[in-house]
Image (cartoon, coloured by chain):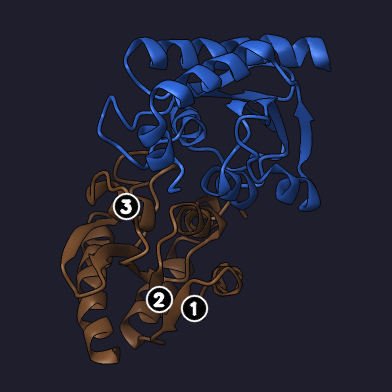
Chain colours: A brown, B blue
Amino acid sequence: MTDAAREMLGIALEQARTGLAEGGIPIGAALFTLDGRLLGAGRNRRVQDDDPATHAETAAFRAAGRRAGYADTVMVTTLAPCWYCSGLIRQFGIGHVVIGEATTFPGAHEWLADAGVHLLVLDDGECAELMRGFVRDHPALWREDIGA
Amino acid sequence: MTDAAREMLGIALEQARTGLAEGGIPIGAALFTLDGRLLGAGRNRRVQDDDPATHAETAAFRAAGRRAGYADTVMVTTLAPCWYCSGLIRQFGIGHVVIGEATTFPGAHEWLADAGVHLLVLDDGECAELMRGFVRDHPALWREDIGA
C-alpha cells in the first residue's frame, strides 16, 4: 500500500507546489479510486480566487464530480485535514485517507479513525517542508486559513 | 433573539426557494454579523452546477468573502448542518448557528453545541415542508447529497 500511496501523494504534492508558485497556500489533494484511478485533484484557493471555502480536499472532491458513493475512494492530501475537510470525508463516507504529514498541523484525522475511516500517515519530508516554509513566511495568512 | 433570527432565516429561505425553482436541492443559508448585517448568502448547488462540494452553508461562507475571524458571526441555515458544514462552522469558529429545522435531517448540531457554538433551532414549518416535498420527490438525489 505504501508505494501506491506515495505515488498518489505525488499528484497531491504537484498541486501543492503549483499553489505555492501561484502565491497561494501550498496544500494539495486528490481523490482516487481504491485501485489508483485519479478522479479529481485540486489545491487550496484562498489566495488565488479570494475563496475561503476551497481547501485542497474540497477542491479535489469538487473536481471528481458527482458520485453516488465514496466508500471505495481514497482522499490523498499533503496535510492532515482540518475539521472542515474531515467533516467532508465523514459525511460522504470516503473510506480511505492518505496524509502526507500531520506534524505542522495536527488535523482531525484521529476523529476520522474513530469513525472507521482507514488512515495512512506518510510523514513525507517535502510536504512538511512546504508547510513549514509557508507558515514561517505568511503566519497571518495561515491563521486565516484555519480560523485561528 | 427569535424575531431577529426569523428575519435572518427569511434570507436563507429565499435562497432555498430559488434553489427549488432551479430544480435544485432546496437548502439555503446566510452568514450575518451578530448585529444582523448580511455578509453573504447561498444555496446548495449540486444540481445547478453539478457541484457536489457546494452545500448551502459553504456557499454562504464563500459569498461572505475572506475574514480574519468568525466568532461574532451567525450562520443561518434552513436545515440542520451535516458533518461537512458542521466541520466548516467548527474549524472557522463561527460563534452562532440558527437552524430552520432539524426534523427532516438530524444534522451534527449537537456536536457543535458540545464544542461551544451557540445554537437556536427554530422548528420552522416552511423549511420542513420544502425538504419533505423534495425528499419525497427526489429520494436518490437527496441520498447523494448527504452521502447516504
- Label 1: which secondary element: loop
Q: Is residue B46 left or right of residue B83?
A: left
Whole-angstrom CA distance, mark 3 to mark 1, is: 20 Å
Q: Residues within 10 Å of mark 3 (few under 14, many from 20)?
A: many
**A113 or B70, which lies in front?**
A113
Which residue lies at the image location 31% right of the left edge and 48% below the top edge?
A68
Q: Is residue B31 above or below residue A28?
A: above
> Which numbered circle lies on residue A99?
2
Q: CA distance from mark 2 to mark 3?
A: 15 Å
Give the x, y percent position of residue A70: 35, 58
Seen at 61% across and 44% down, the residue is B89
- Choose the circle earlier in sequence order: 3 or 1: 3
Do the numbered discs 1 and 2 sit on residues whose CB atoms are within 8 Å?
yes
Question: Residue A24 at what x, y percent from top left?
Answer: 32, 55
Observer-nearest of A145 and A6: A6
| Dot 2 or dot 3, earlier in sequence | 3
Callout 1: residue from which chain? A
**Mark 2: amino acid:** Ile
| Chain under disc 3 | A
Query: Residue at (55%, 68%) from the top-left corner?
Result: A112
Amino acid at the residue labelled 1: Ala
| Residue at the image point whose x is 49% and y is 78% from the top | A102
Q: Is residue B146 visible?
A: yes
Q: Between label 3 and label 1, give the one nearer the viewer.
A: 3
Residue A25: x and y in percent read: 37, 58
Mark 3 element type = helix
Residue A61: which numbered mark, if any?
Answer: 3
User: Quick check: A132 left or right of B77?
Assistant: left
- The tag on residue A102 is 1
